[in-house]
Image: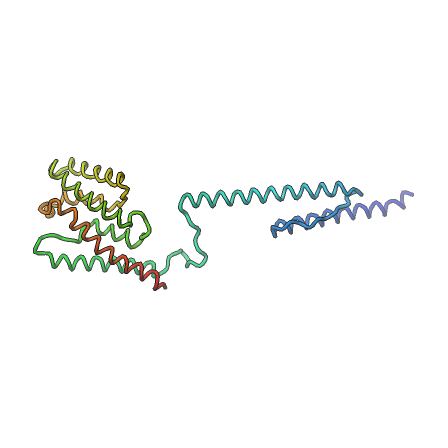
Amino acid sequence: MALQQRPGMLGIGCSNVLARARVQQCLAAASHSNMPCLPVLLHVNGSKKQGSSFLSSQRIGLSRRRRRRDLSGVVVAEASAAAGVTPASSSSPPGGISVSDVLWPSAGAFLAMAVLGRMDQMMAYKGVSLTIAPLGAVCAVLFTAPGSPAAKKYNMFVAQIGCAAFGVLALSLFGPGWLARGAALSASIAFMTITGASHPPAASLPLLFIDGPKFHHLQLWYALFPGAAGCIILCLIQEVVIYLKKNFKF
């Protein structure tokens, strides 16, 4: 009798092993394809209930892993959105920068300095120059980051005019020296904070006026010239640069 039962027992054991292998293959395929596994009825040791509970436990574990993965993806996406980080486009060139993205802003900066330099030659008899260091920083903001807060027209002109005026007032109150520089710079930062006109290049205008005797005769006209007047020219060149970047890519 013992010899007659062994083949049957061996067959039951093999069928159990094959059934478990089929379940594992099904779950592996479901985890890779993100599709629910087809219902599989197991007969483990002759018990349907045991096979169903085994399959249910595997499904619960798989669903928990999916929820954790989806939750982690949502958290990463929200953190990226809060930090202002956007994923790189798959169509962007290697490194994310094309030749046109480099060429047109550089050409715009060259054109800006050429125009301002030509105007300096025309106004040389007045002893005033439009080619000042703060306008170089304005070029960098307008041509390389036209969508930034510092490139907004309101921020730029309000900050340019206000900060230049504080330089004139500080020089008239404290005379040339460190006290005038400190007072003018602190007043400029407070002014930009109160008005919401964030434009960092404008913070150098009061220091330029205090340390530049050739601008002293302008008095309050310095609030409009050369800073604000130069920004008008740069804004016109910025429109040309933006047009070229949008329509002539290579």
Q: How is the image coloured?
A: rainbow
**From the image, which quarter does the N terminus lie in?**
top right
**From the image, which quarter does the C terminus lie in?**
bottom left
Residue at 33% in and 51% down: 147
Residue 178 position (above or below residue 42): above
Q: Residue furthest left?
A: 125
Q: Position of residue 18 (x, y in %)?
A: 75, 49
Q: Residue furthest right?
A: 1
Using residue 155 as the reference point, say whether residue 80 is left or right of it. right
Using residue 221 as the reference point, say whether residue 27 is left or right of it. right
Q: Position of residue 182 (x, y in %)?
A: 19, 36
Residue at 29% in and 59% down: 241
Q: Position of residue 14 (x, y in %)?
A: 78, 48
Using residue 16 as the reference point, say whether residue 164 is left or right of it. left
Residue at 44% in and 55% down: 89
Using residue 5 as the reference point, say whether residue 216 is left or right of it. left
Q: Position of residue 187 (x, y in %)?
A: 21, 37
* Number of dots carrying numbers: 0
Q: Quadrant of residue 190?
A: top left
